[in-house]
Amino acid sequence: MIHTHEITAIVLAGGRGSRMGGVDKGLQNFNGTPLALHTVLRLQMQEGGLVGELMVNANRNLSAYEAFGAPVWPDTLSDYAGPLAGFMTGLERCETPYLLTVPCDTPLFPLNLAQRLAHAFEDDSTEIAMAAALEDDGQLRTQPVFCLMRVELLESLVAFTQAGGRKIDRWTDQHKTVVVPFNLPGDDARAFCNANTLAELQALETPDKP
């Protein structure tokens, strides 16, 4: 069982933002607040008080991210190696038993994300809990950038990336990974919608029509 403040969360804001024309995605505004700061604030509001420490993974404009009040760490892997580079940065810096990974471009993620992922660790064999959500076609699909994991997995991740691995699910498949569905009545259908373009970001600012 995971207790209060046993989770450190890392906001993944280290990407190139190529589908947004190369802008720094985490600094784009969502309802007047930079996406990465919005994500930090939403993590601070997580139900159950499970998230204690917070950090941000960014590779440019570091001073802008530092202004959000959380430690900022760039990738230790070179050449924008993707979300797993952020995972590794988090595991290397994490001083709590568990690390929660959340991307900066999914501003409506659930306020009970940490709590529901944490339930998967009531089974002591669980190493990773990964969120899954319904997509437009009605299929339940995993959301690999939303993971809660044990910090002991650092050594495994280092070995995987040193061998050239870059796909999150290829790595998580090596471990006891529990998929946690967010498809209950009352769950926001847009909770895991991410903004890859500025138009998608603007669309998420508009309340969903009933």
Image: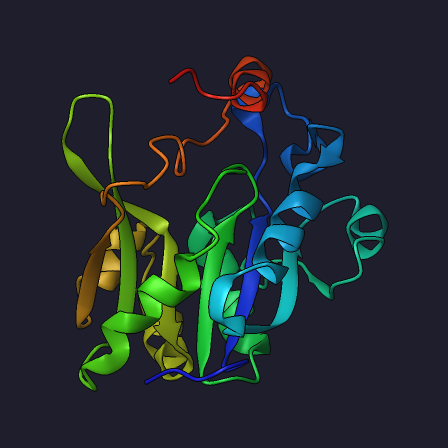
State the image coordinates of residue 183 (x, y, percent, origin top left). 23, 42
Residue found 79% across the figure and 51% down from its top: 62
Judging depth in this view, the residue of 122 and 15 nearest the camera is 122
Judging depth in this view, the residue of 46 and 97 nearest the camera is 46
Residue found 59% across the figure and 35% down from its top: 16
Q: Is residue 3 left or right of residue 13?
A: left
Q: Relative to residue 157, is residue 207 depicted above or below? A: above
Residue 50 in view of the camera: yes
Q: Relative to residue 79, is residue 53 depicted above or below? A: below
Q: How many marks?
A: 0
Q: Relative to residue 77, is residue 140 depicted above or below? A: above
Q: Check the picture and name the quadrant holding the N terminus.
A: bottom left
Residue found 60% across the figure and 47% down from its top: 14
Q: Check the picture and name the quadrant holding the C terminus.
A: top left
Q: Residue extending furthest left?
A: 139
State the image coordinates of residue 91 (x, y, percent, origin top left). 49, 74
Residue 78 in view of the camera: no
State the image coordinates of residue 49 (x, y, percent, origin top left). 54, 72
